[in-house]
Image (cartoon, rainbow, N blue to C red):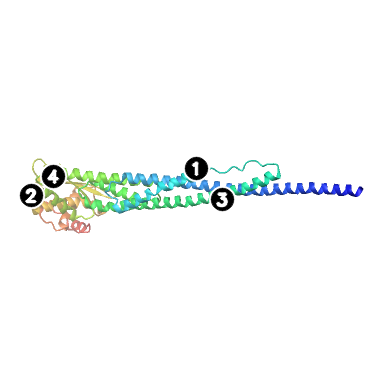
Amino acid sequence: MRRRVLWGLLGGVLIVAGCAAVHILANLQYDDALDAFEDAEVIAEEQRDELAVAADELAADADAANTVVASDSGTLMAADVRAELDESLAAVQPVTDEVAAASAERFPDPGSKPTWPWELFAERARLDEETATLEGRADDFASVNQDVTAASASVEESALAAVRAAADAAPDLEAAHVNARNPEIVALRRAAEHAAGVERLDDEAAARYTLLESAAADLLESEAAELAEKAGPLNGARVEIEAFARSLAPGVLLDFDWAPTVPGYDGPSYGGWTTWWYGDPGYSTIALSDYIAESWPAEWAKALVAHEVGHAISVKCEALYDSSDQDTIEAWATAWAISMGFTDRANGTDVYGAPSQAMIDAAAGCR
């Protein structure tokens, strides 16, 4: 009897111990599955956050690039460069749709921990499945992030190339529109220099391009105004005289004003008047009377224009003479015309007298 009782007690203990072992095992397996789930959730959240940052960067790049596109007038940006920019921007929307679709997916809920072993085993199996789902979600975020990064790089590369190419085209635009006014030419040069220096695509880069386009438009507008101003019966001679003057001082920015008379003269005259600025870059405005155009290409007219160019080229040779003395200023311009081979007395000799040989020699060094 006593032996049967002992065996009964021992059997009960084994059953209790077995149940306890199953319960412990179920808890341990559930806890391991929950830990794996939570680790996968953290990684997925990190990937989602990285994707959100990359998407914001893409949106910023696209906004800046679209500003460049909106500012493009076709004046500076080549068609093939613009086509590459348009192509890169067209690829943004599909990638943005990918981001939206991936971000819309909700993360699974781990739920609360159950009590009974059979429930723990079932939930462990579910957590394993949800963990796999989270791992897949993390992979999806990483994959879309690669697409976003590639699209952003493409937009930035094509937009920066477009801005820099437009800046590089500014000298050709200037050369093709020599009748534009000096302030507009200087403004275009500065805007092109700033645009050429962009290093990354942002609002500043877009603003520099917008300013460059504005400067180009102003240059074209100023040339149109200048051409309209000198239109008329004397236009042909005026164009020839301006080209002649520019040929005497290559690289010097020259503006021209035409009028029946010039400052200091009343009635028809062969007078000229030059104003120059020593800033960087220096430039000059030469005022000429209509009588010079009417008399062109008389030798005296060429000599007079050469005298005025002698004043204008001072922006390159300020240190070669005393520009604070009016007599020296006129002697310099006369000497410069003589050094260029213009010996007619209209070179300034008739009004200001003959310059010294030393002055002529100094002027010969200014080209």
Residue 362, by quadrant, is bottom left
Q: Could you say where residue 106 lies in the image, as x and y percent from the top left?
A: 53, 42
Direction from residue 210 to residue 324 in the image, left or right: left
Q: Which numbered disc covers residue 135?
A: 3
Marks 2 and 1 close (CB-CB < 8 Å):
no
Q: CA distance from mark 1 to mark 3?
A: 16 Å
Q: Residue at x 19, y 53 (%)?
A: 246
Q: Secondary structure at mark 4?
A: loop
Residue flagged by tag 2: what amino acid is it? Ser
Q: Which numbered disc covers residue 104?
A: 1
Q: Secondary structure at mark 2?
A: helix
Answer with mark 4 or mark 2, whichever residue precedes in sequence: 4
Q: Return the residue at label 4.
A: 231
Q: CA distance from mark 3 to mark 4?
A: 76 Å
Residue 110, by quadrant, is top right
Answer with mark 4 or mark 1, whichever residue precedes in sequence: 1
Q: Could you say where residue 328 lies in the image, as x and y percent from the top left?
A: 20, 50
The 10 Å Cα crowd at callout 4, few under 14, some 14 to 19, many 20 or more, is: few
Answer with mark 3 or mark 4, whichever residue precedes in sequence: 3
Give the mark toward the camera: 2 or 3.
3
Residue flagged by tag 4: what amino acid is it? Ala
Q: Return the residue at label 2.
A: 295
Nearest the camera: 206 or 229? 206
Q: Residue at x 36, y 45 (%)?
A: 66
Q: Secondary structure at mark 3?
A: helix
Q: Could you say where residue 144 lies in the image, as x and y percent from the top left?
A: 47, 50
Answer with mark 2 or mark 1, whichever residue precedes in sequence: 1
Residue flagged by tag 1: what amino acid is it? Ala
